Image (spheres, grey):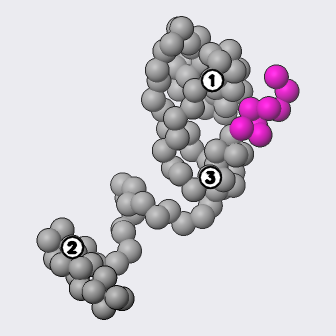
């Protein structure tokens, strides 16, 4: 297995997408999450280091503590303030229509 999980995580951290589905062999996930789990609180480690059942689906959030993917977010995640005006949908759509007409 070596450091292949580190290469995979690095590729995930540096992608522009922030929500990614991973489909892979359960053994790879188990070994990867076990390696990551060594840095976690024992309660978290116990949860993420469980063996996967066949065709099991799990949802989890991995945090990049190394800041490899430190690009500014383009999505409004909880705790962050979105850039630009916070207009109601109808006003924003109306403004967008005006911009498209002026570009023509």
Residues at marks 1 and 3, CA–CA distance in whole angstroms: 18 Å
Seen in the picture, residue 22 relative to 34 is either above or below; the reply is below
Q: Secondary structure at mark 1?
A: loop
Disc 2 residue crowd, few under 14, some 14–19, many 20+, Cα 10 Å: few
Quarter of the rendering occupied by the C terminus: bottom left
Q: Residue at x 54, y 66 (%)?
A: 72
Circle number at residue 93 = 2
- Mark 1 or mark 3: name the one nearer the start of the chain: 3
Q: Is residue 72 left or right of residue 11?
A: left
Q: Which residue is mark 1?
A: 24
From where the camera sits, is residue 70 visible? yes
Q: Is residue 34 left or right of residue 54?
A: right
Q: Which residues are magenta?
A: 1-8
Q: Secondary structure at mark 3?
A: loop
Seen in the picture, residue 104 relative to 90 is either above or below; the reply is below
Residue 3 percent location from the top left of the image: 82, 32
Residue 17 percent location from the top left of the image: 53, 51
Q: Which residue is mark 3?
A: 15
Residue 1 percent location from the top left of the image: 82, 22
- Residue 55 in magenta stretch: no
> Is label 2 in contact with label 3 (beta carbons under 8 Å)?
no
Q: Residue at x 52, y 35 (%)?
A: 21
Q: Residue at x 31, y 82 (%)?
A: 100
Q: Secondary structure at mark 2?
A: helix
Q: Is residue 11 left or right of residue 75?
A: right
- Residue 3 in magenta stretch: yes
From where the camera sits, is residue 42 visible? no
Give residue 62's quadrant in the image.
top right
């Amino acid at each position: 297995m070596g450091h292949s999980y580190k290469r995979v995580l690095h590729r995930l951290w540096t992608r522009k997408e922030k929500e990614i589905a991973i489909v892979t062999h359960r053994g790879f996930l188990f070994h990867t999450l076990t390696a990551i789990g060594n840095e976690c609180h024992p309660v978290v480690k116990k949860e993420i280091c469980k063996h996967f059942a066949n065709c099991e689906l799990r949802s989890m959030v991995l945090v990049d503590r190394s800041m490899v993917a430190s690009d500014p977010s383009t999505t409004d995640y909880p705790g962050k303030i979105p850039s630009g005006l916070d207009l109601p949908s109808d006003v924003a759509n109306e403004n967008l229509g005006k911009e498209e007409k002026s570009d023509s």
